[in-house]
Amino acid sequence: MTAAAPLLRVEDLRVHFDTDDGTVRAVDGISYELQRGRVLGIVGESGSGKSVSSLAIMGLVDGERARISGRVEFGGRDLLALDPEAMRAVRGNEIAMIFQDPLSSLHPFHRVGDQLAEAVRAHRDVSRAQARARALELLELVGIPDARRRMDGYAHELSGGMRQRVMIAMALVNEPALLIADEPTTALDVTVQAQILDLVGRLKDELGMAVVIITHDLGIVAETADEIAVMYAGRIVERAPVARIFSAPEHPYTWGLLASIPRLDAPRGEELVPIPGTPPSLLGLPRGCAFAPRCPYAQPRHHEVDPRAEPVPGDPAHVVACLLEPAQRRRLWAALRTPERA
Amino acid sequence: MARYILRRIGWTVVLLALVSAVTFVIFYALPSADPAVLRAGRQASPELVAQIRARLGLDDPLVVQYWTYMKDVVLHFDFGFSYQSGESVRAAIVSRLPATISMTVGALVIWLATALPIGVISAIRRRSLLDRVTMTGALLAISAPVYWLALVALYLFASDIGVIPIFDGANTYVGITQDPVQWFASLLLPWLVLAAGFSAFYARLLRANLVEVMGEDYIRTARAKGLPERRVVWRHGVRAAITPIVTVLGLDIGVLLGGSILTESVFNIPGVGRYAYDAIRTADLPAIQGTVLFAAFFIVVANLVVDIAYAFLDPRVRYG
Amino acid sequence: MTGDALVEVRDLVKHFPAGGGAARRGAGVVHAVDGVSFDVRAGETLGIVGESGCGKTTTARLMLRLVDPTAGSIAFAGEDITHLSGGRLKALRRDMQMVFQDPYSSLNPRQSIGAILAEPFAIHGLARGEGERRRAVQELMEQVGLNPEHYNRYPHEFSGGQRQRIGVARAIALRPRLVVADEPVSALDVSIQAQILNLLRALQRDLGLTIVFIAHDLAVVRHMCDRIAVMYLGKIVELATADELYARPRHPYTAALLSAVPVPDPAAKGRVRQILGGDLPSPTDPPPGCRFHTRCPRAVPGHCDVVEPALEAQAAGGAAACHYPLGA
């Protein structure tokens, strides 16, 4: 891609939890890069590790029983190697994160304005009044009507969409270079979702931020992301520019996802093709390809050998972790595509 | 809010009336002994007993007796006179209130000062040695009956009879105005005994609440903002975990102001609790009635105060 | 697909007292459902879509008489069931059932699957005897794609998708005529949703069910339903066949909803999207006139904020409650 160094480079990130029942391999070796001002969409279902991987980048994984390894390069440092105090200076400052449920993510007993001002004063040496002024500025930027009054109000007095705007304001108050949004619209109505995604898009352009958006909704990433990483059982099974993921996906799981969702732009009568089985438990993953038990094209060898992420021939920006032969995959996809989809 | 308070005060009155009625029925209508006989003393002649009965109005219908009693209470704040000493019950209680208040406040300070740090640290360092030791110790302290604890404390530490005489023992209490130093010294051991059970309970309660709160999403947000961990724990965690504790605290204060009967009795502190104990022992009905009403009053008022405080602590709660 | 009306709802209203507890004078009332009329035809799948607070779940509960209406009437198979109670209501329950949204909280964690599925039979006095009941339950389990040998397992031993199958099984145990599915797949992973949707379609075919399908996911509703009602703040704003609704929405709210749904096609990135401004008005204080006028790009002052539009049949079929419908 560009010659500039990426803003964020994740290398072989692993997060393993030691539990009484064994080791849960929540994130099992993921790697990706993100350039300044670009949007990466991480798509996965429950148990895919998508949230944990981002929490690990932020240093928010509960350290006691977790073993984290790999490298996370950001601004010339390996975030995983930083001591807690140095990492704290990065959180909420250079990298910010917003979460799924804005009601439970805001403190119920503190005023909205105070929570924002607190975020400012954690990283900037400013007076209370200055912090409050900055908070007000951000609330207006994210489109909260009557912001001055809302500053002194509480989270439960706001609607879901307003709360998520407050969360966004709080995340952006120190102008981070990277924003991680973990299922930011899942708990919101669809019209509110459109508002929020539109807002994030505008602010991203205004502030020149890079964004990682984590979701299970392929529609959202199609419309907001530049690049998509598909996660399954703690690994990235496919990563490509957004157009390629939809026009020429290479991994059977991606095919399965695309085939199983009802779409507004496809003919009505079409049968949905679900992916058989259920996502695996991350405790004691079977040997070999984690998707093999559910893959219609799996061969005996696939239950033994671990697939590694490799570039697709002729397209270095497109990476897939699949043991099928590339030519075979092309054929299979062409066959699946024949009920014409975009 | 004002309407809510007025409504609650109305209910308070009703509740107190109910408490007084129930107590009245229990002690007057179903007595374990004839009050007149008790009042008359040993070897009283039947005429004397009859005289006393007439004077105390014991032959009037129950309702009339109750009405007379309540009239005196409400209009003249008069709780009658002790069968034992003839002293005005109101005067007796009022004179003993300072001792009870001393007990309550001192124990309160000690148990909060110990429970809060222990609760917080145990919650933050779960499963550490400190956590396990303190929580086990707390369990023991809660399980021990307070009078047993008091007696053991005296046996071990009382200056007159104790194995390691470091604290003043029983019967050493004086009022604060009389001799502040002695007042303080005499209350140390009772305070520690009384605080033990409460401290244990509050430490466990705070630990449990805080553990739950620290798992909430808004704590994760606080950390994601890059706040120092200390601030996350106290301003976000403890702040949220403390509200149920305030509720319980208010109620406990209300109960204690009614007199900690057992502790006062063992240490022979002249408080309302000791008075109540003596009254029960001698079936001194007006005194019993008086202390019950007093205690009920404090508890009900504490209830109201706590509910109002809750609305200030938790902005999601609004009364109307 | 069309048949006689199995359920007829007329002017259904449900108001809840606001702020919990007894309604005080002037305390406000939540207009959850505020005058809703529609038919559910035998054998069809009717979808009800809308965002939070639109009243779709309340409408479903009213239809099943899980909640008593404040006003209006409900008829099932020609019989007025609005004020039914006691034994008659219990008998009615055999014919109309519900599948709930959350597979994690709608099953009693202390009961085995066998016990949960045997309950409908027990309640209505069917399949007497241990053996017969067991057989009936296992047949039911097979029908929804569960392994009948898992009869004695508990809900926590199943995945979300399997639990939802159990919920479906419980609903169809007594072969009801009507099944109301309240957001049956919203809590499930994407790859599992298709399994449950396919199951519902298959069961509808095999058992001749009529389904009322409530959801907020427009793509799912379009896939599953023959006709769709769009609700906003307690009213139906549009009612049309699925094809008509998605191709030619008449009500501006429907158009905004459809525009807001993200499409899994990167080519759609540049499309003009209608971002609906403002916030949902409070259901305790709905706007006068047309409830949507505060956010409607086509609202005409003096008309839309004064006169409430009725749900009227449109020329091309379907009905919309709008003074200035799209494409008119």
Image (cartoon, coloured by chain):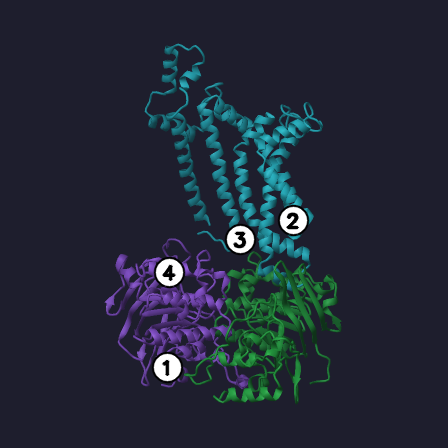
> What colour do you see for chain C?
purple
* Residue assigned mark 4: C118
Q: Is residue A40 visible?
A: no
* Residue assigned mark 1: C325
Instruction: Tell which circle, 3 or 2, labels the residue nearer the N-terminal end.
Output: 2
Picture disc at residue A125: none
* Residue assigned mark 2: B122
Query: What distance separates the C-alpha of mark 1 from that of mark 4?
Result: 50 Å
User: Looking at the image, is mark 4 or mark 3 nearer the viewer?
Assistant: 4
Q: Where residue C49 sits in the image (x, y, percent)?
A: 40, 73
Find numbered disc 3 in the image and state the secondary structure of the residue it sits on: loop
**Residue C279 vs residue C305, the one in the foreground:** C279
Query: What distance separates the C-alpha of mark 2 from that of mark 1?
Result: 64 Å
Q: Amino acid at mark 2?
A: Ser
* Residue assigned mark 3: B314
Rate crowding at label 4 as few (under 14), some (14 to 19) or many (20 or more) other CA atoms within 10 Å. many
Chain coloured cyan in this rendering: B
Q: Amino acid at mark 3?
A: Asp
Q: Where residue B192 sits in the image (x, y, percent)?
A: 64, 34
